[in-house]
Amino acid sequence: MDQVRLFALGGLDEDGKNMYVVEVGESIFVIEAGLKYPESTDQLGIERIIPDFKYLIENQHRIQAIFISHGHDDVMAALPNLLRHVKAPVYSTPLTAMLIEEMLKKEGLREIRVHRVKRNSSFKIAGIPIRTFGMTQSIADGFGLSIETPQGAIVYTSEYIVDYDIHNDAFSCDITALAEIGKRGVLALMTESVGADREGHSAPHHRITEFVEPAFEDAEGRIIITTYHQNLYRIIEIIELANKYNRKVIFYDDDLRAILKAVEKMGYYRMPIGLEIPKSKFTNELKDVVVIVSGSGDHVFRRMHKVALGEDAMLRLNGQDTVVIASPVVPGTEREATNMENELYKENVRVVTLDRRKVYSMHASIEDLKMMLYLFKPTYYMPIKGEYRQLVSNANIALNMGYHADKILVLDNGQIAKFVDGVLKSTADQLTLEDVLIDGNENLDVSGMVLRDREILSTDGAIIVGIVVNHKTKEVIGGPDVQSRGVIYLKDADHIVKEIGNIIERTVEDAVKEKRYENMAVRMEAKDRIVKYVLKETGKRPMILPAIVEINVTE
């Protein structure tokens, strides 16, 4: 019987960066390829963090499929980075596939084929049966996945809630399909943990209508609402409220409008006719309107912050406006959200913030997780998607339902669960993983050298010292020139500046005299000497950037 291995390259002990790997014999199946946003202030200039793909790159010839369960950044936004190194087929549902194709097009990846599958379907890849099943998520077309190995199914539910009042097929969940998979035998069940410490079901607490509607009833002027453009369920609620109160809708974000066009084209939802005012016809004098300001991650907060500061070219606030913050704070966005909200209060507009204790994000709560355990009846249970305390809360749910501790897998990223003949044989093997930091569109070194340099620049400044030497004789013929930024005020420290110049000059002369001159080595030696001197004189450790320029001199 083929060995089955199960592990995560991201998503354990963290919120975001989800990537899970199922190995059946020699075949590799990848589930998700997401990012997370930097949470700490010491990650200067970092835009996003993605999983370490080394293992997948080394074993790319074995990858049979990459599954993307829905259209959120935490499960799909690292896909372009992966596909630059790994050529493998991608599988997803129509809406998510369209979002993936647009994303790949922007990244210049035009030859990747994205296979479209139905939310509830069965097919085979490399001879292994695959079954998808629809799950209720905050974006349409979300699905879970069953990979049917000879030892039993590996089931991945993705994020979800259980809501019996969903009447839109693009958001619905077929409970009977889940029960059928459970009857066949499930080796391991992977479920999310973000809401594992919340009592009860998430539904109906995920709906915002009853909390936002009073703002529609009381607003004297415009209503401006912030939301994530990938939270389609919430956006539809806002549109329906606008239609009920005869308010026109303006979409600030073009990406959101593109998503809604795709949703309409696929028949998942159709906006009421005549409700929208095109962005091109928007003016700040319009009264009975709802402006939806959306974006992904902290971009939505940055956009609204810019509006609050009066720096936005399109939207200007006035005292009659009501601003509804319907975009919950997620890890990595706290500072931007606080800055935005603080500035809004300065503008004397009415601010309505949804109470996180009353309005839940669309993640499974305790009773939702219990239902999955009841339906699938897995032999092993693996909490995923969450910080460590949330993984433990999820594990405790299984313990309370009668599962023994040896049947519950709380793993670290890179820790491999190995199954043989339907039994867990080991979790001892461990892949060495590093977070990959993305600065703009490029990867930073995982060693952290760039971040340490940035931290030094932000605290102790920099000193640039340059000197010109004769390329042939190595005689000093120009300089030294010393520039200080953020270290010392030059007019008050002439002696320090002069000595820094003398140090690099003496270092060059000593190396030439001792016949050991080599440009890079001399620069490093000068740097070490200058660092010690500046620390002694100022108590600071600035970044020292020495430059020795060699030029040919015509005799």
Image (tube, grey):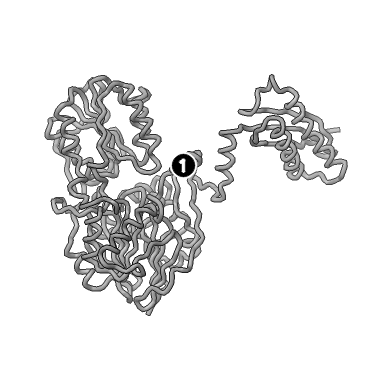
Measured as percent of width and height from the top left, residue 461 is found at: 61, 32
Q: Is residue 127 above or below residue 347?
A: below
Q: Residues within 10 Å of mark 1 (few under 14, many from 20)?
A: few
Q: Is residue 307 above or below residue 363?
A: above
Q: Quadrant of residue 505?
A: top right
Measured as percent of width and height from the top left, residue 522 is found at: 77, 42
The secondary structure type at the circle numbered 1 is: loop
Front residue (pair 234, 402): 402
Q: Is residue 447 above or below residue 429?
A: above
Q: Quadrant of the C terminus?
A: top right
Residue occupying image coordinates x 75% and y 32%: 467
Residue occupying image coordinates x 59% and y 45%: 449
What is the number of callouts on the image?
Answer: 1
**Mark 1: amino acid:** Ser
Measured as percent of width and height from the top left, residue 19 is found at: 39, 57
Residue occupying image coordinates x 34% and y 53%: 390
Residue assigned mark 1: 40
Determine if residue 402 is in view.
yes
Q: Is residue 331 above or below residue 408?
A: above
Measured as percent of width and height from the top left, residue 320 is found at: 23, 21
Front residue (pair 442, 19): 19
Determine if residue 124 is in view.
no
Front residue (pair 120, 47): 47
Q: Quadrant of the N terminus?
A: bottom left
Q: Quadrant of residue 539?
A: top right
Residue occupying image coordinates x 75% and y 24%: 495
Q: Residue furthest bottom?
A: 1
